[in-house]
Amino acid sequence: MSPNSVPNAATATVAAEGRTRQRRGAGDRVRSLTPGLRRLRTWGPLLILAALCVIFAVASPRFLTVDNLQTIANQSAIPIVLVCGLTFIVIMGSIDLSLEGAMAVTSVVSALLIANDVNGSDLGYLAVLIGVGLGLLFGLVNGLLYTKLRLPSLLVTVGTWFVGLGIAALLFPARQPRISDGSLRAWSLDTLLGVSRLVFVALACVLVAYLLQRYTKFGRYCFAIGGGEDTARLSGLPLDRVKVAAFGFAGLMAGLAGVMATTRLGVGSVEAGEGLLFPTISAIVIGGTLLSGGRGGILHSLVGVLILGVLSNGMVLVGVDAYVQQAVQGAIIIVAVVLTTWHARSRMRVIK
């Protein structure tokens, strides 16, 4: 046996032991749940969504009208795109708070490159690609800073959030650039099957994200990192590359969301993503994805977005005060966090 084969064999043995411990731990956690609790954990968010629909349908005859359901779909389009990217970050046990900054930069830049009333630019759909590319670049920077500096993702992305807002403010002209490109505005103004075309863009993003999660190494590696980063490292997974790719994909989705917001508003705005960060994270948690990582998925997040959309819309229809709406949403988020982390609390104490 050569000297070099000794450390290689030792590494392989340690990795195998780590994988065995992980499988045993996962098996113990699964066996500790009764079948009823396992079904509740899986189907709970859908049951909540169904219950909300029934409650609001009884409380307001306008809730189940075609027009109102179309309104919910239209309002959910941009949040759905955002959760498609951010879900992979949360599955890894990390967080990305920079999406509002990325959307601000994307909105201002794309509006200035599309035909507008401020300058003579008219790049058409190329401006959309540039905007989405800026979002991708933003995400890659997040990932590189996170992996190379070894700082918590929360600190890194809070910093880049404000950097993005600052850059957008510097690029912002004296007045809002109004888009005059009719073909791009049509994506939010025209409808297909009664809903905005942006809804179909969002559904396409869900399909892409689901395929990445379900059928690629990237998706499996994200779950492996969230399930146990030390074990994933011992198993030889390219952790840094996966993390950078995940942040890059989240940035790409934020860039697309920024362009979508620009076409919907008809102007480029530093505030294009304002107020979307908290609902996006909330939807992911409500849908059943653990903040500590390792469990959840794109379809869970989609259900979470719909729960928040139905809740917000229904409370408006029944005349609930705005402050009470915030309190109700906060209470639902707390309940969702408790339910999704109850059987993972010992693991979370170890992480802390």
Image (cartoon, rainbow, N blue to C red):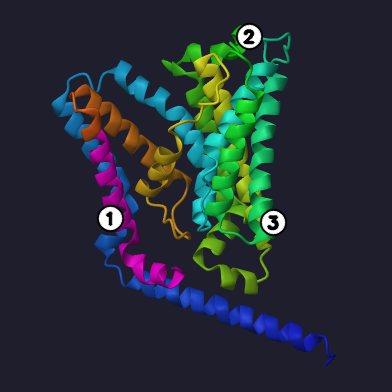
Between disc 3 and disc 1, the foreground one is: 3
The location of residue 299, given as percent across then percent down, is 44, 44
Q: Quadrant of residue 234?
A: bottom right
Alpha carbon separation for disc pair 2 and 3: 38 Å
Query: Dot 1: few (<14), some (14–19), or many (≥20) neighbours within 10 Å?
Result: some
Q: Earlier in the sequence, mark 2 or mark 3?
A: 2
Alpha carbon separation for disc pair 3 and 1: 35 Å
Give the magenta part as a residue range: 325-352
Residue topped by disc 1: 40
Q: Secondary structure at mark 2?
A: loop
The location of residue 114, given as percent across then percent down, is 67, 15
Q: Residue at x 29, y 57 (%)?
A: 338
Whether residue 193 is visible here, answered yes or no, is: no
Instruction: Give the numbered dot on residue 23.
Output: none
In-image side of 115 versus 300 (left or right): right
Between disc 1 and disc 2, the foreground one is: 2
Q: Secondary structure at mark 3?
A: helix
The type of residue carrying mark 3 is Arg
The type of residue carrying mark 2 is Asp
Q: Earlier in the sequence, mark 1 or mark 2?
A: 1
The location of residue 344, given as percent across then percent down, is 37, 66
Q: Nearer the viewer, residue 125 or 197?
A: 125
Q: Nearer the viewer, residue 171 or 295?
A: 171
The type of residue carrying mark 1 is Leu
Residue topped by disc 2: 181
Q: Residue at x 41, y 70 (%)?
A: 347
Query: Dot 2: few (<14), some (14–19), or many (≥20) neighbours within 10 Å?
Result: some
Query: Dot 3: few (<14), some (14–19), or many (≥20) neighbours within 10 Å?
Result: few
Residue topped by disc 3: 241
Whether residue 126 is visible here, answered yes or no, is: yes
